[in-house]
Amino acid sequence: MRIATPRRYLMCPPAHFRVSYCINPWMDPTKPVDPVLALFQWEDLRDRYRALGHTVEVLDPLPGLPDMVFAANGATVVDGRVLGARFANPERTAEAPAHLAWFRARGFTEVREPEHVNEAEGDFAVTASWLLAGQGFRSSPLAHDEAQEFFGRPVISLELTDPRYYHLDTALAVLDDARNEIMYYPGAFSPGSRAVLARLFPDALLATGEDAAVLGLNAVSDGRHVLLPRAATGLREPLRARGFEPVPVDLSELHKAGGSVKCCTQELRPAAG
Ligand code: ARG
């Protein structure tokens, strides 16, 4: 029996969302995007979290930052401690201070402005025992050490090798953060990282290339409900077989920027006790 635990998320509405530049293979500025539909789909995701009993905080979107909707990239919060982001691409640089300001205004006291490039939960995933950390396209391996020191959690560095899976959260999702349960697409990782994942997570749910290619791994779990892209149909049965409840959502417009459910969702993990 899977138990959902109430979560607190930070999201940012796609008020200024467009695909106006290209910093990953999914983005094609010549392809049309429907901004009204993008907002409608985002609101649906937000409302589903709330209907499941989760708290959703909202960050004000800023003009000129079309990717700010991908709030997962703006900061990493573990045990109430906030590690800010430092973006690899200049197009997104200004998102990081907006996140830091939000945390400071809300009374978070342990807030670190990072020294090294890290795209936050795009490349960091929190499990019961480890902080999994992606590198290869965006976050610097130096940021992995910085995160380990700041959070005091052992970091497992993983190397991404396929440009379509430029962030860890496009290739791996935590299903149960109290029990080290994950799902991932092995094809996104270097042979050594694949071996590390197999060793640490021998029972992981392994996704197919088809489900990965519709960003099916860009999912959010509360321990029971797994919100994931609607097109990732192949993941539903294996999730159900493990006792999870798949909740398909349609984020077709944000997909055109290379993001989906998890990218839109930053988790604010409280201090214990
Ligand atoms: N266009 C954005 C970028 O390439 C998408 C970010 C998606 N976010 C994520 N957590 N994977 O930076």
Image (tube, rainbow, N blue to C red):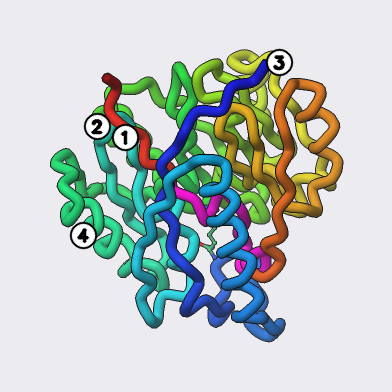
The span picked out in magenta is 254-266
Mark 2 closeness class: few <14, some 14–19, many ≥20 residues within 10 Å: some
Vertically, is 99 above or below 180? below
Q: Nearer the viewer, residue 185 or 66?
A: 66
On residue 203, the disc is 3
Determine the CA span between mark 4 and mark 2: 19 Å
Q: Magenta segment: does it hold 88? A: no
Kind of residue sitting beneath label 2: Phe
Q: Position of residue 210 (x, y in %)?
A: 84, 47
Q: Position of residue 199 (x, y in %)?
A: 63, 14
- Percent from the top left, x then y, of residue 40? 62, 71
Q: Residues within 10 Å of mark 1 (few under 14, many from 20)?
A: many
Residue 147, label in figure: 1
- Cα distance, mark 1 to mark 3? 26 Å
Q: Residue 201's x, y, as percent?
A: 63, 17
Which disc is residue 165 wearing?
A: none
3D distance between C-alphas at marks 2 and 1 = 5 Å
Q: Which mark is residue 150?
A: 2
Amino acid beneath label 1: Ala
Label located before the other in sequence (1 or 4):
4
From the image, state whether disc 4 or disc 2 is nearer to you.
4
The residue depicted at 77 percent of the width and 53 percent of the height is 230
* Residue ID for mark 4: 101
- Going from N to C along the chain, the mark reached first, 3 or 4, is 4
Please give the name of the residue rendered at 49% of the width and 25% of the height, measured from the top-left corner.
127
Instruction: Point out the tag, 2 or 3, that comes first from the N-terminus.
Output: 2
